[in-house]
Image (cartoon, coloured by chain):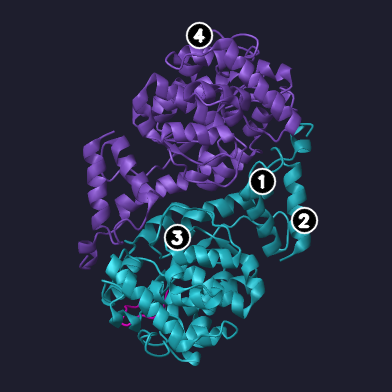
Chain colours: A purple, B cyan
Amino acid sequence: LDAEAMAAARERHLTLTKPPGSLGRVEEVGARLAGICGECPPPVPESPAVLVCAGDHGVLARGVSPWPSEVTAAMVANFLSGGAAVNALARTVGGRVSVLDVGVAGDLPDHPLLRSAKVRRGTNDLSRGAAMSREEAARAVLAGAHLAEELVESGGADLLATGDMGIGNTTAAAALISSFTGRPARETTGRGTGIDDATLALKTRVVEEALELHAPDPKDPLGTLAALGGLEHAALSGVVLAGAALGVPVVLDGVVSNSAALVARALAPDAVGYLFAGHRSAEPGASVALEALGLDPLLDLGMRLGEGTGALLAVPVVGGAARVLSEMATFSDAGIEG
Amino acid sequence: LDAEAMAAARERHLTLTKPPGSLGRVEEVGARLAGICGECPPPVPESPAVLVCAGDHGVLARGVSPWPSEVTAAMVANFLSGGAAVNALARTVGGRVSVLDVGVAGDLPDHPLLRSAKVRRGTNDLSRGAAMSREEAARAVLAGAHLAEELVESGGADLLATGDMGIGNTTAAAALISSFTGRPARETTGRGTGIDDATLALKTRVVEEALELHAPDPKDPLGTLAALGGLEHAALSGVVLAGAALGVPVVLDGVVSNSAALVARALAPDAVGYLFAGHRSAEPGASVALEALGLDPLLDLGMRLGEGTGALLAVPVVGGAARVLSEMATFSDAGIEG
């Protein structure tokens, strides 16, 4: 982050026609945007894009979700036809939806909104062995980074929101969050789509078993991702890394995105400066991950859908923060003695 | 509120392509929007408008704010030229700004964004006598209601966000909130634009004195408004009442709007059903008022600027809630067994 641009934004906030600090956290967001793009005022994001990374999960064989893995492909088809929550909320904030298949088990049609970069058809069961190879994890990371890069470099996106789809993916997210934070499975495992008490107990045991089996080393992020990750978690960590490398703000969605941000931070600690936590998911692992990342979520609406829905609703807060810095009059412009 | 439309929205949420309840509070917002307009799905708000009601305050003579009353007119001029925070955030969410002068002390230019309905040039000092007459309070209420009605009936607005401008107006808001909730001045009085400890102590004493002087009766809302209110608080209560009468959602800004909502509720208890608390202002009185109103704020970003800024940032949450109900596919549309 550009410390000089951040300081200039904080200075500028004091000259704008409002009491100092009266926009609360919106002012901090604005200062960070200045640091991200390296200038003050920062440009107003005009083209937000949500990147929904999708994959399937071998751990579903353990019964961690009542939904079959076919729902992943069916929901991707729903994203492509514009009928999902992510589409409705993207329209609300003027965002583009882009879907990345890095690991959906089923076949998907060609579609302009879909980038196909299938690394494999779903992961192996992470509680019985490695979810994927290191090479596969790396390929998924790169697929996410490449799509983000193409969108940004083509002018198709100047703000990236993260999203995920993958039946079973909150199990992988919990395992990753436990690995990178050292917190036990019972604190990171949640009800996902809304499982009952018995399934939650089973899911927590599965995460515990996976952590015991792999004894993952958080200093080896790619190995941890290969052992416990989903392909979409890997791709999302690539989206985060690309956003940071390109100097574009990245707005995180819920628990899956949060777990991917922990992976990204382990690979490149400075990436966190480019991240905004769009919301606090109701999944307990989300709060554990956000605390570890040092990110305070912008929204807290009890959402737990994924797809990028919570990130999208936070986009106007980020956009507004930029607009305040670039469009507000100063006291001297307005002829007011501040 | 239309109970049948609300029930239909809750039913519809269960059929949409997402786990039940996974959009958290966004689903409640959607159900209430259905209840407000009396149909499911509710129409998507396409024309949000923020109504910024402005007035001046005789209590400023007591030294409750370091800002002179001239700043009220100067900031209104800033709204009209598009340089204030409310303008930047209205542009962010595609909203229209409309300013109502019900009591600014200074003269204001004719301008297409300004409705002049000056009831008087600022209030009297509420700590020494009634802030205004009952008739003046009523005229200000009606001015707010009329502007809201004109905007809605002309098709210029299908969602109303409330906003305020008036140096000294958090003092009046604290007094109103104490009157309607029975909570002491020390719990409702805050730092407003950012006053120091000594000024806060003075401001709290001024509110206490006003409450002792008037012994306001919350069952007489117009009398309470006349004794303690600002003209903009009165106008905002009219905006709330008009929104409810016209079946249009009203998104509240911070503490001044919250105090006006308490007045509106005392006049018409059912009006609360039409209200969404856009955000939780950092002013302590805001939380007291919201609790009394039974409203859970959508955003909590530490903002305390007023003008409608916090309400505007919540508009996409409300709009998104409507869009989810009208635009999402059902499981049967998507060929998924839910």
Q: Amino acid at mark 4?
A: Arg
Q: Is residue B100 above or below residue A82?
A: below
* Residue identified by numbered label 4: A134
The quadrant where residue A169 appears: top right
In the image, are marks 2 and 1 on the same chain?
Answer: yes
Magenta: predominant secondary structure element? loop
Q: Which residue is mark 1?
A: B327
Q: Residue at x 53, y 79 (%)?
A: B146
Same chain letter for marks 4 and 1:
no
Which region of the structure is painted magenta?
B100-111
For the residues marked 2 and 3, what is the alpha-carbon distance in whole angstroms?
31 Å
**How crowded is the residue under tag 1: few (<14 C-alpha within 10 Å), some, or many (20+)?**
many
Q: Name the chain letter of the residue that bears numbered label 4.
A: A
Q: Nearer the viewer, mark 4 or mark 1?
A: 4
Q: Where is residue B55 shown, x and y percent of the image?
A: 38, 78
Q: Report the chain holding disc 2.
A: B
Residue A265 found in image quarter: top left
Q: Which mark is on residue B7?
A: 2
Q: Distance of mark 4 from mark 1, alpha carbons?
A: 40 Å
Look at label 3 and name its amino acid. Ser
N-terminal of the pair, mark 2 or mark 3, is: 2
Select label 2 or label 3 by which is in front: 3
Q: Is residue A45 magenta?
A: no
Circle 3 SS class: loop
Dot 4: within a 10 Å radius of its alpha carbon, few (fewer than 14), some, or many (20 or more) residues? some
Above or below B181: residue B143: below
